[in-house]
Structures are given as structure tokens and as C-alpha cells.
Amino acid sequence: MQILDETVKNELTERLRRLESHLEGDVAFFYGSIEASVMRVFRDFVERMAAAVRIPDRNRLVFFLNTPGGSAEAAEKMVEIIRHHYHEVFIVVPDFAFSAGTILSMSGDRIYMDYSSSLGPIDPQVWNGKEWVPALGYLDKVEALLKKAASGQLTNAEFLVLQNQDLAVLARYEQARDLTVTLLKEWLVEYKFRDWTIHRTDPEKKGQSVTRGEKQERAEQIALKLGDNKLWHSHGRMIGPGTLERVLRLEINDYSADDKLRPLVRSYNDLLTDYIARGGFPLFMHSREFF
């Protein structure tokens, strides 16, 4: 097993270096849930990578993200750690980055996906003491019951359900929802829209300069749509790059037809995720300096 691990490690490092050369940045890979418990090891992981000798004047991170989601607060801290060390960040989603992973993806200067990659709705996940649960489902149900109550159509059974709701818990869910919108608005304007200076598609504004207010307005539209349960219908909805560009008008670097980048991404990601699956690792990070 030790010989096999060493062989896989050497091969992954070689494939990683090819990606670094092609995308001109430090490549890092994250697999697992986004939780507060991983922050210390993630901090050390990024610090070790950033401190290593690298090409002068290159301050770009190419961050591979595979995650089912987790905590928006933890995603915010991961972005703070990354941005402390790197000026420019490319997020690469070869497979999926759901929930908090989608939130984190919106902090990238670029988001790389291919036709089989998926982001998801940003329904915030809240820990209920036993498991992560989507907050917006609860809020939507309570809102529907309140509307029925206001119109005098609430049944006795529904009244009991409404009466038993914990207001403190509902307030926490509302705070989680508001945090996700705030983070997306801040990150999209600061990073993703940083180089969006001229209108390119709006026929009425084409060629005109983009104002900060317009960037904020577009960012809020994206945030609200990503958090709209009525639009996606399922917290587990897999949203591909075509839908992101068509419905959200969010620019994605789609490498589906890139004959140079696509094989580089897949050869690295698929070997590494196969290794992770074989080992049953719930959390895994990889870089030139860390395995």
C-alpha cells in the first residue's frame, strides 16, 4: 500500500504541475464538507502552499472544489484565508460544489466548469443538533402558513404546527439566509465583477461603462435567484454552466470544448477523487506541498 500511495502521489504531483503551468497559478484541491472544524488544517494547508517558492510576481490560486456544502460562516472564513494570501483566485468545479460550496465559488475571479459540472441553490444549511438542514424550506413553509392564517384559511392542524415553531430557530434561519445574500453580493462585486468595466450584451448600454451600482444590482439578482426555492424546487438541484449563464446571466469559464484544459482537469481530478473514494476519506486536501 505504501508503494501504491507513493506512486499515486508522484503521478498526482506531475499532473498538478501541468495544470499550474497551463493556468499560471498555484493549484490546490479541497474535498469534503465546509465546516468550522476544518478551519485550522485548512489555514495551515494554504499557509504552507503560499509560503513555498513560486514564480515571482505570480499571485494566483487555482482552487479545485468538490463539496456537498456545509456552513456559510465556514465558507466565509475559507475565503478570508485564501484572499489573505492570494490576489487572484480561479475556482474550478470539475464535479460539484453545492450549497456553501456554491457560495464559496462566487468568491472567485473566474469559475471554471464543464458541461457535467454542477453548482446548486444557496439554501443555507443550518445545524439542528443532529444534521445539516436547509433553512429556506422551513421559512417558506412558515410563510405559507402565515398567509393562510391572514386569509382565515388555516386549519386546526396547521395552527398547531405554526404554534409549535421555535421563533429563535426561525430567526437563526433568517439570519443564515441574509448572510448568504450578503456574501454573494460582496464577493461578486469585489472579485467576479472586478474586471467588468464595459457593458457587452445589453443593447441599450453596450459600450458604456459599468457603474458600481450596476454591479451591485446584478450581484443581488444572482444571489436572490440562487436562493429562490420556487425557481429550483429542490435543494439538491444540479445547476450546470448553461443554466447559470442563461438564467442567472453569470459568466462561466466553460472548458467543455477546450482540448488542452479539459484533459488536464479530468486526469488530475478523476485520479484524485478515485484515490479518495478508495480510501474512504471524508476530508482531503492536496497541493504541491501537501498530500
Image (spheres, rainbow, N blue to C red):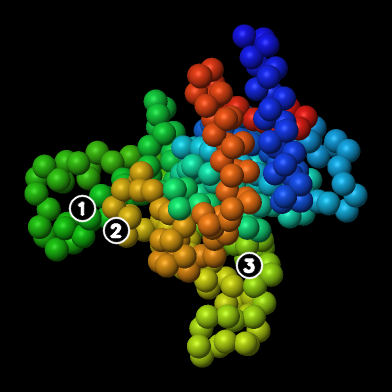
Give the number of the mark in front: 1 or 2.
2
Kindly tell me whether residue 179 is visible in this rendering.
no
Q: Quadrant of residue 182?
A: bottom right
User: Which of the two discs, 2 and 3, labels the residue nearer the N terminus?
Assistant: 3
In the image, residue 187 above or below residue 6: below
In the image, residue 47 above or below residue 257: above
The residue labelled by disc 3 is: 193
Q: Residue at x 43, y 41 (%)?
A: 125
The residue labelled by disc 2 is: 230
Front residue of this view, candidates 257 and 175:
257
Spatial CA distance of label 3 from label 1 is 39 Å
Spatial CA distance of label 1 from label 2 is 16 Å
Q: Residue at x 47, y 48 (%)?
A: 117
Crowd tier of the residue under label 3, counting other residues whose Cα lies within 10 Å: few below 14, some 14–19, many 20 or above: many
Look at the numbered discs 1 and 2 and tell me whether their residues touch, using CB distance below 8 Å: no
Q: Residue at x 53, y 38 (%)?
A: 66
User: Which of the two discs, 1 and 2, labels the residue nearer the N terminus?
Assistant: 1
Q: Quadrant of the C terminus?
A: top right
Front residue of this view, candidates 231 and 134:
231
The residue under label 3 is which amino acid type?
Answer: Phe
Q: Is residue 237 left or right of residue 279?
A: left
User: Which of the two discs, 3 and 1, labels the residue nearer the N terminus?
Assistant: 1
In the image, residue 239 above or below residue 33: below
The residue labelled by disc 1 is: 145
Mark 3 element type: loop
Front residue of this view, candidates 156 and 179:
179
Mark 2 element type: helix
Q: Quadrant of residue 143?
A: bottom left
Residue lying farthest to the bottom in this orientation:
204
Q: Quadrant of residue 14?
A: top right
What percent of the width, then of the height, locates residue 276? 55, 24
